[in-house]
Image (tube, rainbow, N blue to C red):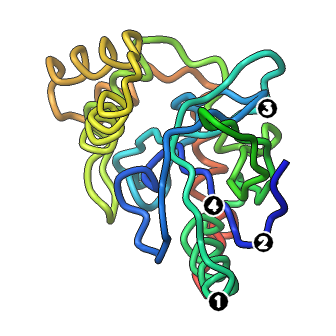
Amino acid sequence: MKPCRPLYVFGYGSLMWRPDFPFTWSESALAIGHSRSLCVWSSTYRGSPERPGLVFGLDETPGRKARGLLFKVEQEDRRRVIHYLFQRELIYPIYQPSQVLVQTKDDIFQALTFTVDRSDPAYAVNINHSVRRAAIASGRGRAGRAKDYLANALMKLRELGVQEPALEADLAAAEALPDDPDLLFGLLNKAMRCRLDLVFKPVHERPSV
């Protein structure tokens, strides 16, 4: 295992195509014991109270591996990059900074990433295909559409040689749906609505610092 100096960062969502921090190299890699899914209700970047969207989270899942990108950050940039990543990712309390084992074709590293807290109301648990696809179709926040977020992720994963047929099917189905949040709200049961109410409470979102 490589020591965590310099800093290694594992990206599995928007960090794969928009890292926005200095790094000396990046390489396709696997987060050991974790899985990626659209399991986070986005209240800001790809969603809003009027148009909730879904983004990726990284779940601890024994026996699984999640493909993403590993970035190497030199020691002189370490503190600055950590500060930037905490500002960017910790706007949502569901994301927790974590050290995970990441495997490249040649080695294993310990890397900083952001895993999900399953107890947080933003954890999109037990949602069916229809709800997920409606959220992808109409979700929109300050960073743009949930649909574009998923399309960007799939494009990057294809570049890495990763096939995600279930996510490809979700995107295709979402593109065939109307851009209408009423469709999503009409599919939500009482428990889902209660969770979303908690997600969009002002106290739930941490302000950027």
**Quadrant where the C terminus is found in the figure:** bottom right
Q: Earlier in the sequence, mark 4 or mark 2?
A: 2
Amino acid type assigned to the residue bearing label 3 in the image: Glu
Pointer 1: what residue? 76
Question: Where does the image place residue 129, in percent across and percent down from the top left?
Answer: 44, 11
Q: Calculate the distance from the C-alpha at mark 2 to the C-alpha at mark 3.
A: 24 Å
Q: Earlier in the sequence, mark 2 or mark 3?
A: 2
Q: Earlier in the sequence, mark 3 or mark 4?
A: 3
Task: Determine the residue located farthest toward the front in the rendered image.
Answer: 106
**Element under label 1?**
helix
Amino acid type assigned to the residue bearing label 2 in the image: Arg
18, above or below 103, in the image: below
Q: Are marks 1 and 4 in contact (CB under 8 Å)?
A: no
69, above or below 138, in the image: below
Q: Which mark is residue 5?
A: 2
Q: Which residue is drawn at 72% across and 18% down?
A: 64
Compared across the picture, whether 164 is left or right of 89 comes to left
Compared across the picture, whether 79 is left or right of 29 comes to right
Q: Do the residues labelled 4 and 2 touch (CB within 8 Å)?
A: no
Kindly report which numbered mark, 2 or 3, lies closer to the viewer in this rendering.
2
Q: How crowded is mark 3: few (under 14 residues within 10 Å), some or many (20 or more)?
A: some
Q: Residue at x 66, y 50 (%)?
A: 198
Kindly report which numbered mark, 3 or 1, lies closer to the viewer in this rendering.
1
Q: In which quarter of the image is residue 66?
A: top right
Amino acid type assigned to the residue bearing label 4 in the image: Tyr
Q: How many numbered marks are there? A: 4
Question: Where does the image place residue 79, in percent across and percent down from the top left?
Answer: 69, 86
**Element under label 2?**
loop
Q: Which of marks 1 and 4 is nearer the N terminus?
A: 1
Q: Which mark is residue 1?
A: none
Pointer 4: what residue? 92
Pointer 3: what residue? 60
